[in-house]
Amino acid sequence: MKKDWVIFVGCIGLFASGFIFARLLAQFGYLPAIYIKWEDKLDIGTIFNIVAAIATALAAYAAFRSADTALSAAKDSRAFARVQTYTSHQQQFDRLLDECQAEMGIAFFRRIELYDKIFPTNRYSEKPFTSCAEAALVSQWGNRYDRLRGAVESNVAPDDEDIRKWIIDCVSLANDMNFTLKQPSEGQIWINDSTYSYFDHNPGKPLYNIAETIHRLARFGLMDISPRRIFARHQPVFLATYNDFYQRIKDGLTNHSIR
């Protein structure tokens, strides 16, 4: 409303300044003198003309207000629809994470942050909403998993330091997807006797959970990424070396511990 009054006063001021400027030009001889002459009598036609002019002005103002109100309503409607879409999509995302937790025993943290990682533009109303995940990020997760899987499938036996780094890389990838692996109730490896690792005697379960989580997040984001799972028969060298590493920890032959 305040904006309308500013426009109205501005128009009056512009009209008045034009009239004054014309009178000044007339005073200096550049234009003929301008006078406003009022008739002593008003006939019925003049009255109707005045009334019609006033009615036209009021109708124009009403039309302007109506258009302005309609524009504001349309903007409000679009903003409300965008919020509803965003909220519904995020609720579906939360249900997906709940399913992952229930079925795999993992735990997600800072869920909104994870959503913003995968769908970075959806929280901004001035940007288009999308159901498609950030392709570069999800592909990066898939590539990191492939490197972890490649180390497991290798025919070259890893040493203790390789296994330690492999465990840390698995935990790091899970953390980048804002979840923690299921912590064993007993028999867990503690790196350097100070940092829990989520790994016990079976290294396959945490790696499977990482692959499955990537697959589900990618599918929710309409991406066709399905990391290849590995089984015991695919990892004879790695598994034998890992079991030996685990046993030597139990025997106190390393800097790590089992709890």
Image (cartoon, rainbow, N blue to C red):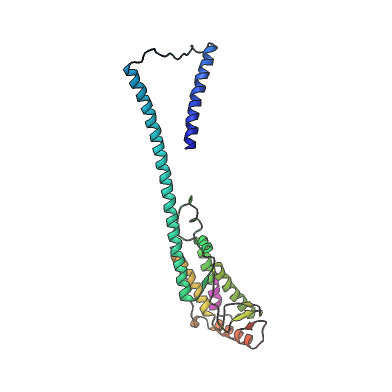
Residue 219 belongs to magenta span: no
What stretch of residues is rendered in magenta? 147-155
Pinpoint residue 242: horizontal percent, then vertical percent: 58, 83
Q: Is residue 152 magenta?
A: yes
Instruction: Determine whether 54 is above or below 171 in the image.
Output: above
Of all residues, the one furthest to the front in this rendering is 41
- Residue 14 left/right relative to 168: left
Name which residue lies at 33% across and 21% down: 48
Residue 189 visible: yes
Q: Is residue 224 visible?
A: no
The image position of residue 139, as x and y in percent, is 51, 65
Q: Nearer the viewer, residue 111 or 223?
A: 111
Q: Examine the image and state in which quarter residue 129 appears.
A: bottom left
**Residue at the far left in the pictured view:** 44
Residue 195 on image: x %, y % = 63, 76
Q: Main secondary structure of the magenta part?
A: helix
Q: Which quadrant does the C terminus fall into?
A: bottom right
Q: Residue at x 52, y 79 (%)?
A: 204
Q: Is residue 35 above or below residue 1?
A: above
36 or 140: nearer the eye?
36
The residue sitting at 43% across, 48% down in the picture is: 76
Residue 16 at x, y percent in the picture: 50, 22
What is the total number of numbered labels drawn onto the structure image? 0
Between 41 and 248, the one nearer to me in the picture: 41
Q: Image quarter for residue 167?
A: bottom right
Report the residue that reaches farthest toward the bottom.
Answer: 251
Residue at position x 54%, y 15% in the image: 24
